[in-house]
Amino acid sequence: MNDNWIEFDKKLLSDSEVANLRKKFQDAVDWGKKAGYTNDKHQKELKDNSEKVASIRGGIINSMVDFEHFLCIFLSSYFCENWKETEFYENILAQDFFTTYQKIKLFQRVGYHKQKKYKGKYNGLSGIMLKLNELRNLVAHGTPLHFTKPELGFPYSGKATHFDDNLAKRFGNAFEQAYYCLSLLDEDLKEEKFKKEYGRNKNTQKLSEKDLNEEIKK
């Protein structure tokens, strides 16, 4: 079996080169302290900020990975017969060219959640999905705007997000709502497919019994 992570074992620098580079960075910090540009308090703020952003950032990205997987399952089930679902997922939805944004837009275009029987219960669901994905993209690709404040953004677009417990809570609430709605829709879809398949098999069975009776009469 091939090891797909074998590149991790490549050593591009010697131990002494790594040690020298670390020393250079530390020397730069020490020089900054002596010159008055930084101090221990400032360095602690940098470290705390980095850990804060990493924690919330990781939670958002991790949650959206799970959400995208579930959305792929729903779309595969919608478009395919049972024996084709896995193939559709792996060969189309899971490929690099099919982005999370495109999957959400496809869900929106299909409009399964807009059926009359739901009486508008899921109105706004695709919009929440798009907002969740927008935040996911920001935290995944954004850069720090201020190293002592938990802020990320795209410097040239003007978009920015302040990372704090309130953001994490708001994201968590919106994510949970979208995930549970999708879960209920997936249950309905699978029930519909089961009834359709069961009805088809039942009709086939009746047809077979009829043919058998005809043969008996002969």
Image (cartoon, helix red, strand yellow):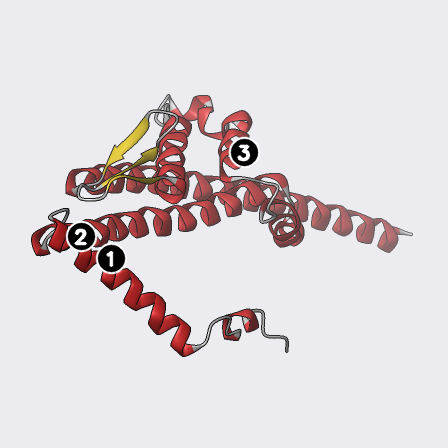
Q: Secondary structure at mark 3?
A: helix
Quarter of the image where the N terminus is located: bottom right
Give me the residue at 69% from left, 44% from top.
Answer: 203
Where is mark 3, residue-wise? 102
Bin the neighbour count of mark 2 within 10 Å (Cα to Cα): few under 14, some 14-19, many 20 and up: few
Q: Looking at the image, is mark 2 or mark 3 nearer the viewer?
A: 2
Foreground of the two, 28 or 192: 28
Residue sticking out furthest to the right? 218
Bin the neighbour count of mark 3 within 10 Å (Cα to Cα): few under 14, some 14-19, many 20 and up: few
Q: Secondary structure at mark 1?
A: helix
Q: Is residue 209 above or below residue 109?
A: below
Q: Amino acid at mark 3?
A: Gln
Q: Position of residue 91 (x, y in %)?
A: 66, 50
Cα–Cα span, label 1 and label 3: 45 Å
Q: Which quadrant of the figure has residue 129?
A: top left
Left or right? Give the position of 63 relative to 112: left
Say which mark, if any, is on residue 132: none
Cα–Cα span, label 1 and label 2: 6 Å
Q: Position of residue 58 (x, y in %)?
A: 31, 52
Give me the residue at 10% from left, 53% from top.
Answer: 39
**Mark 1 or 3 closer to N-term?**
1
Left or right? Give the position of 35 relative to 66: left
Q: Amino acid at mark 2?
A: Gly
CB-based contact (under 8 Å), mark 1 and mark 2: yes
Give me the residue at 58% from left, 49% from top.
Answer: 94
Q: Amino acid at mark 1?
A: Ala
Where is mark 1, residue-wise? 28
Foreground of the two, 187 or 169: 169
Q: Which quadrant of the figure has residue 21?
A: bottom left
Q: Is residue 207 above or below residue 44?
A: above
CB-based contact (under 8 Å), mark 1 and mark 3: no
Say which mark, if any, is on residue 32: 2
